[in-house]
Image (spheres, rainbow, N blue to C red):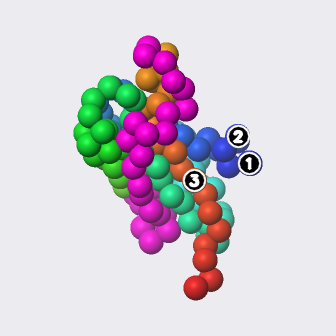
Amino acid sequence: MYFNQTIGDRVLFAVDTSTLTEQGKQILVGQSGWLQSNPEYLAIIEGHADEVGTREYNIGLGFRRANAVREFLVSQGIPSDRLRVTSYGKERPIEVCSDESCYSKNRRAVTVISIASLS
C-alpha cells in the first residue's frame, strides 16, 4: 500500500520511552499530510513494546506511544475523531529474538489506515 511504503506507517521509540524522535516526527508530518488529503480515512494507531518487562507495563507503554503519535497528528491539524489508539504491548512482535536488534524494531507505533464508516 502507498501509505506504508511511501509515507511510512511506523515510528520507533527508544527503550522505556514514549517520546517521539526527530525522525519519528518527520514520518508523522508525512502521515498528517496524507490524512489531510484523504479525509475519508481514519487511522488506528497501534502501540507496541519489546519483550522486556511485564505484560501490564508494556500494554501501558504501548498506549503512551500510541497517544504520543495521536497527539502529534492532532497538533498537525488532524481531527481527533479520525484517530483511535490501541496497545498490543509485547504481544505482537515483528521480530523475535532476545537481542537489541529485535527489540529496537518492536518498540514502535504503527498507523493503520481504514476507510471511514458511513454509519
Residue flagged by tag 2: what amino acid is it?
Gln
- Where residue 5 sits in the image (x, y, percent)? 70, 40
Q: CA distance from mark 2 to mark 3?
A: 12 Å
Q: CA distance from mark 3 to mark 1?
A: 12 Å
Q: Earlier in the sequence, mark 3 or mark 1?
A: 1
| Front tag of 3 and 1 | 3
Residue 25 visible in rendering: no
Callout 3 secondary element: strand
Residue 106 visible in rendering: yes
Residue under label 3, please give it. Answer: 112
Is there a contact, CB below 8 Å, between mark 3 and mark 1? no
Callout 2 secondary element: helix
> Which residue occupies the foreground of this view, 24 or 58?
58
Instruction: Answer left or right for 29 relative to 15.
Output: right
Q: Is residue 31 magenta?
A: no
Q: CA distance from mark 2 to mark 1?
A: 5 Å
Range of residues picked out in magenta: 73-100
Q: Residue at x 41, y 55 (%)?
A: 86
> Which residue occupies the foreground of this view, 108 or 32?
108
Total numbered badges shown on the rendered structure = 3
Residue flagged by tag 1: what amino acid is it?
Tyr
Q: Is residue 93 magenta?
A: yes
Few, some or many residues within 10 Å of mark 2 (<14, 14–19, 20+): few
Residue under label 2, please give it. Answer: 5
Q: Residue furthest bottom?
A: 119
Q: Residue at x 54, y 60 (%)?
A: 43
Whether residue 60 is situated above or below residue 85 in the rendered picture? above
Q: Earlier in the sequence, mark 2 or mark 3?
A: 2
Label placed on residue 11:
none
> Which residue occupies the foreground of this view, 108 or 27?
108
